[in-house]
Image (cartoon, helix red, strand yellow):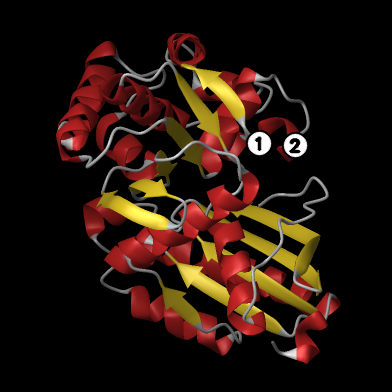
Amino acid sequence: MDTNFRKKTIAAIDLGSQTFRLAVALIVDNRPHVLASQLKNVRLGQGLAANKRLAENAIKRGVETLRNFRNVLDKFRVSDVIVCGTAALRNAANAGEFLDLAEAEGFNIKILSGDEEAFMSVMGVRTTLPAISAPFLVVDVGGGSSEVVLAASSNILFNQSLNIGTVNLTEEFIRTDPPLPKELEKLRFHIRQKLSYLSAELPQSPKTVVGVGGTATTLGAMALGMEKYNPRRIRGYALGSQELDILWNFLTGMKIHARRSMSGLESKRADIILAGIAIFREILHITEFKELTVSDGGLLLGLLTSLIEKESDNHAEPPNTRGLYL
């Protein structure tokens, strides 16, 4: 073990298609204590599905957010940082433009493959829900894609990255406010088609279905009516299929400006939340589960944990999150 790693400050950054997340942790004897976390709705994947390119304004928002993250890293004197990109940077023809601008700001971005993203999400789930029954199905609904992973402990039994995300589905199917019934039906039919293979292809039936990522935690926060986000209440929360149905029926009749006032729903997710609910409803229908277990520990926490274990050559203890975003 690296004896210099007994106490140091590290950081992980997850560049999602919808959200950029940062976590800074002080590591003392392999136990991470989260010092700071930030979440910024960048929507890097805006317009990507139609144009196959990152929009100029999206790139500007992303670079500006990285500059803000740099200030946080400098404040805490971070010695090591891991920065990873997902679907938007995997799929954009001009991803190199963003990568070059990020490098000029001092960020060396690793674009995760679908398999790598799946493994990191599973690591985050195992860290937050150590007693989870195996095999468990992890569903990470992002802005540009959804990862569906069946795992037992740290072993990946099945993994599929699907190009259905809250941003690209919203842009493709929802054109009116509030959405028309025919738009919602087309949205649901498209999701159903994309997931139709799932039950037949899973090598084992899951004992638990776990939702991770911003869509899942937002749905948990909405179901709990949270005025202020509290990860401790989210972690392990059982979100029933009936609760999802109620949210769907309630929100589909509301205009976006009305959704923005709802407890637990960030205003910048108000337009894309319907697509997220639709994906999770279909997942529960296909797997014949009555509830979704929500975890606040997904990709970002997995990245943080992997950095600890890589540098210390030792198992990372579960984090003291201090109620912050992970």
Picture coordinates of residue 194, whole percent (x, y): 18, 37
At numbered mark 2, what does the secondary structure look like: helix, strand or loop?
A: helix
Picture coordinates of residue 95, whole percent (x, y): 35, 74
Q: Tags 1 and 2 in contact by the CB under 8 Å rule?
A: yes
Q: Residue at x 63, y 69 (%)?
A: 12
Within 10 Å of disc 2 (Cα), the crowding (few <14, some 14-19, many 20+) is some
Within 10 Å of disc 1 (Cα), the crowding (few <14, some 14-19, many 20+) is some
Mark 2 belongs to which amino acid?
Answer: Arg
Mark 1 belongs to which amino acid?
Answer: Arg
Q: Is 74 in front, or is 170?
A: 74
**With 10 as the anchor, is 150 left or right in this view?**
left
Residue 246, numbered circle: none
Q: Is residue 54 visible?
A: no
**Residue marked by disc 2:** 232
Q: Residue at x 35, y 30 (%)?
A: 279
Image quarter of residue 17: bottom left
Q: Residue at x 42, y 26 (%)?
A: 277
**With 252 as the anchor, is 163 left or right in this view?**
left
Q: Is 2 in front, or is 120?
A: 2
In whole angstroms, how far apart are the C-alphas of marks 1 and 2? 5 Å
Image quarter of residue 317: bottom right
Q: Is residue 311 visible?
A: yes
At numbered mark 1, what does the secondary structure look like: helix, strand or loop?
A: loop
**Residue marked by disc 1:** 235
